[in-house]
Each structure stands twice: as structure tokens, then as C-alpha cells.
Amino acid sequence: MTSHQAPAEVFWTAFRALKKEDRLAIAHKLLLDRELGEDLRYAVLIENRKREPRISLKDYLAQSSKRPK
């Protein structure tokens, strides 16, 4: 475990030990922070799209130029 992972693990363990209402209150506060909320939303999008097939930039550009505008 790295020196950056250790505090995250402590925080995560403490967070998971909280009552559900308290976890939701913290999550709500995190999402209200505009910059952090944006980071979290991007992290979720990235995680969800990991399973999508990959396409090279060259192929993407070729496909997008064929689409009607």
C-alpha cells in the first residue's frame, strides 16, 4: 500500500462504518462541491465506459466524417 493509499483506506473504512443517513449526508456535501462533484461525475463516466469497445482516433474521425450533419 502506498503512502497515498493508506489515508484513503482509513477514510473509506470510517465512512463505511457510518450510519446510512450519515453516509448520504457526506455524499451530498461532496456533490455540492462544484469541482469535486464534477470530478466524481467524470470518474463514474470513465468507470462505466471502460467496458465499451475501444476505437482508434483515426477510425473515429473516419466514422464521424461519414455521419450526416
Image (tube, rainbow, N blue to C red):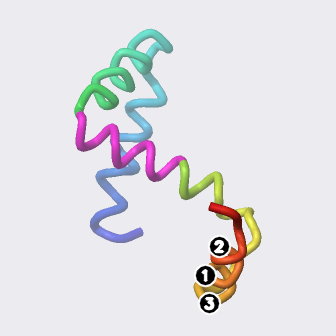
Circle 3 — which element? helix
User: How far apart in space, not on screen, are marks 2 and 3 (Cα)?
Assistant: 10 Å
Give me the disc on residue 64.
2
Q: Are marks 3 and 1 in contact (CB under 8 Å)?
A: yes
Above or below, comparing residue 4 to residue 58 in the picture: above
Q: Where is residue 13 in the image (x, y as percent from the top left)?
A: 43, 38
Residue at the (44%, 9%) spot, across then down: 21
Image quadrant assignment for residue 50:
bottom right
Q: Do the residues labelled 1 and 2 touch (CB within 8 Å)?
A: yes
Q: Mark 1 points at which residue?
A: 61
Circle 1 — which element? helix
User: How far apart in space, not on screen, are marks 3 and 1 (Cα)?
Assistant: 5 Å
Above or below, comparing residue 50 to residue 64 in the picture: above
Residue 58 as seen in the image, left or right of residue 25: right
What amino acid type should be assigned to the residue bearing mark 2? Ser
Residue at the (64%, 77%) spot, across then down: 65
Give me the disc on residue 58.
3
Q: Residues within 10 Å of mark 1 (few under 14, many from 20)?
A: few
Check residue 38 for magenta coloring.
yes
Q: How crowded is mark 3: few (under 14 residues within 10 Å), some or many (20 or more)?
A: few
In the image, which residues are magenta? 34-44
User: How far apart in space, not on screen, are marks 1 and 2 (Cα)?
Assistant: 5 Å
Residue at the (30%, 31%) spot, across then down: 30
Q: Position of residue 40 (x, y in %)?
A: 40, 44
Q: Position of residue 31 (x, y in %)?
A: 34, 29
* Image quadrant in which the N terminus is located: bottom left
